[in-house]
Image (spheres, rainbow, N blue to C red):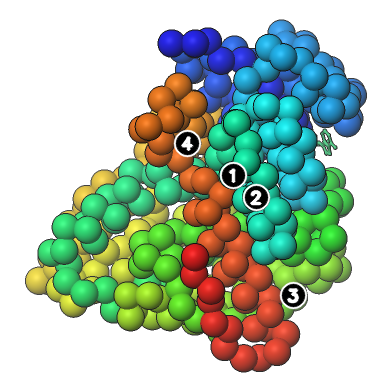
Amino acid sequence: MKTLNAALIGGGAIHSCHVIALRQMPGVTLRALADINSEVGLKLAMAYQCRFYQDYQEMLLDDEIDVIHICTPHFEHKRMILAALAAGKHVFCEKPVGMNGGEITEIAHAAQNAAGLLGVCYQNRLNPTSQRIRRELAEGEMGKMLSIKAVLTWSRSGAYYTESPWRGRFATEGGSLLINQAIHTLDLMQWFAGGVTRLKGVVDSGELADVTQAEDSAMATLHFTNGARGLFYATNCHTTDSPLLLEIHCENGTLQLCDNALWRLCNGERVKLVSDASTNGVAKSYWGLGHQHAIGNFYAAIQNPEKADYTDIREAGKSINLVEAIYRSSQIRQWIEINQQ
Ligand SMILES: NC(=O)c1ccc[n+]([C@@H]2O[C@H](COP(=O)([O-])OP(=O)(O)OC[C@H]3O[C@@H](n4cnc5c(N)ncnc54)[C@H](O)[C@@H]3O)[C@@H](O)[C@H]2O)c1
């Protein structure tokens, strides 16, 4: 198996989840890190004993680099993905892959014509609880799905937005709560139900209105392809990061994700099926613990493209569609039909 050289663009909050994952993978070397903030970048590169670049374009000229990890603000994703693919690299990008449908179309076109693969980090799909939900639903014993309820109540302080001023702005983040935090929840809901046909939603800003231009809270009703209904509420205005509460009500019982554990409620019994336990103690539990798994799957696909099992641009685009539809619905106060590809 070929040794793969990895490089990161962006050394901010999320980058360490990538580094931890890469360091635990056999046959993978962290070769370089790029960050426009040279003070931050140099310090990290010294700690990781890798090369440092202030200009990521210069880093892309290094023929020894196989995979580029993009861990930068949202408005940089499209530009960086296109540049890295054009340089012949494989790309693993943090969510959201782009900020809107127009960007997704452009990125999808580039990915289709590129030699390298493009993977997107939706690590929560790989949580043991998520995997078990998919299995329970596929096995069919729960019966027809009737509804999914999801409640995400997280906490973001004013400092979170002022320390990284690209956050909370449409121009640089593409929105706020929906496109950054709640996108994982929307992705899981549509993934469990097999797609969304229409939705009606509303976004608003309250507690964080002084520090964000975009929404700090949102709710939506979704109609899924399988006929079930989705009820979604999310906010960044809680005082702590509560674990996602998600319930899937089916004809024969309910699957309940609560405190990072999955329960099956059936015939008056509540049985614990599986829980999302931390494997390395470093990743924050509310981000999910699947970075290592998601990155591992992507590298396995590079080594063996026939057995590819990672979130590609087509899958990643689905939750962006939903985010955009909720913003639009909130503006015009109407149901939005979802164009499912
Ligand atoms: N998967 C998850 O659960 C998860 C969790 C948190 C963040 N994220 C995603 O990770 C990405 C980064 O978020 P963050 O919170 O780490 O951001 P951050 O603001 O903490 O860090 C961004 C870093 O990128 C650097 N940067 C900005 N522009 C650059 C450029 N042109 N070239 C090189 N470096 C540049 C900044 O200097 C900074 O160090 C976002 O897409 C975010 O949505 C994902």
> Which label lies toward us, 1 or 3?
1
The answer to whether mark 1 is within 8 Å of ligand 1 is: no
Seen as rendered, the residue at the extreme front is: 113
Give amino acid for label 4.
Ala
Label 3, label 2: how far apart the Cα atoms are: 35 Å
Residue 61's place in the image compared with 259, above or below, is above
Three-letter code for the amino acid on which mark 3 is drawn: Ser
Mark closer to the chain start, 3 or 2: 2
Disc 2 vs disc 4: which is toward the camera? 2
> Number of labelled discs?
4
First of labels 4, 3 by sequence position: 3
Residue for badge 2:
109
Q: Measured from the top left, where is residue 71 in percent x and y?
A: 70, 37
Instruction: Give residue 146's quadrant in the image.
Output: bottom left
Q: Which residue is mark 3?
A: 205
Q: Is residue 231 left or right of residue 43?
A: left
| Secondary structure at numbered mark 3 | loop
Kind of element beneath mark 4: helix
Residue density around tag 3, few if under 14, some if 14–19, many if 20 or more, within 10 Å: some
Q: Residue sitting at 57 percent across and 58 percent down?
A: 317
Q: Quadrant of residue 283?
A: top right
Give me the C-alpha separation between circle 4 and circle 1: 21 Å
Residue at 42 percent across and 48 percent down: it is: 125
CA gap, disc 2 and disc 4: 23 Å
Going from N to C along the chain, the mark reached first, 1 or 3, is 1
**Badge 2 vs badge 4, beta-carbon distance below 8 Å:** no
Q: Tell me the tag on residue 294.
A: 4
Q: Which of the two labelled residues, at mark 2 and mark 4, occupies the earlier sequence position?
A: 2
What label sits on residue 112 in the rendered view? 1
